[in-house]
Image: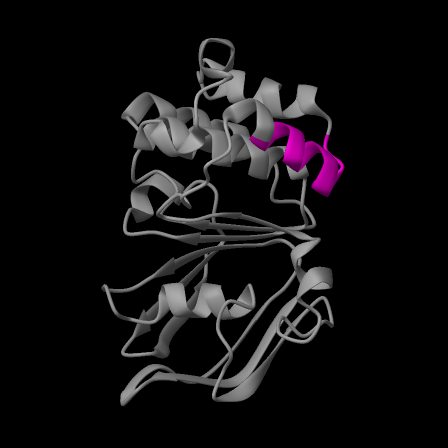
Amino acid sequence: MIKIDNLTKRFGSTISLDKVSIEFKKNNSVALMGANGAGKTTLIRSILGYYHPNSGSIAVNGFDPIKEREEVLKDISFVPQLPPPIKLNIDELIGYIQRSANIKREIILDYANEMKLDIKSNIHKSFFKLSGGMKQKLLIAISLARESNIMIFDEPTANLDPKARDDFYRLLNGKQKDKVLLFVTHRLEEVKDLVNREVYMDLGKVVSDEKL
């Protein structure tokens, strides 16, 4: 589903990805690990088409994330480590997602409820003004509601309390079939029951890739 071949990405004189080649196939549930600066987030953003590689290639379901980004993003759910500065209120944001991704509002609300997010009391509040935990819960609810075949989570539980983390992983359990799940994480113990593959990066390279 995701094929990366000899990918290099530089920022000035800094090499963030150094000739990375790796493939993620159906039923891969992957913990992507490594120290800060190892290249994990650059790899994810390259898959999403945020970054243009200096050399090498990426194919997501056969599509190029730069040239065919709209096709690529149709089948990806993504939860970033830092929520984006969205100025819409919750009602407007859900309405936008409902129309643009063809997701039923009720499904988003159901997942938000499962994440213990009080939508009703905050429906007219700006997303930008929500607490970090509330933002993350809503983004998780939206990502799960999309039912994408590729689901990418960049430190998704960083702003969540332990109970919300448990809710998140409970909701994900069983969703691995026929999908690619990528977890950028420093907490292997949290995802160990969900993943079947561990990939370690360091200095822009894949240094370890093991099936579990």
Q: Position of residue 82 (x, y in %)?
A: 35, 47
In the picture, measured across the screen, residue 145 lies left or right of residue 31, that is: right
Residue in the picture at 61% in, 38% down = 175
Q: Position of residue 201 (x, y in %)?
A: 33, 71
Residue in the picture at 51% in, 16% down = 123
Task: State the residue in front, 64 or 28.
Answer: 64
**Quadrant assignment, res 162:** top left
Task: State the residue in front, 180 or 198.
Answer: 180
**Quadrant assignment, res 105:** top right
Q: Position of residue 71 (x, y in %)?
A: 73, 62
Q: Residue furthest front?
A: 87
Magenta span covers which residues? Answer: 93-103
Residue in the picture at 35% in, 29% down = 129
Task: State the residue in front, 142 or 90.
Answer: 90
- Whether 5 is drawn above or below 199: the answer is below
Q: Residue furthest top?
A: 121
Say if the magenta span includes residue 176: no
- Whether 48 is drawn above or below 177: the answer is below
Residue in the picture at 40% in, 43% down = 85
The mark tally for this picture is 0
Q: Which quadrant does the N terminus fall into?
A: bottom right
- Whether 211 is drawn above or below 173: the answer is below
**Quadrant assignment, res 145:** top right
Do we see residue 70 in this rendering? yes
Dominant secondary structure of the residues highlighted in magenta in the image: helix
Say if the magenta span includes residue 97: yes
Task: State the residue in front, 171 or 9.
Answer: 9
In the picture, measured across the screen, residue 177 lies left or right of residue 93, that is: right
Q: Position of residue 208 (x, y in %)?
A: 36, 72
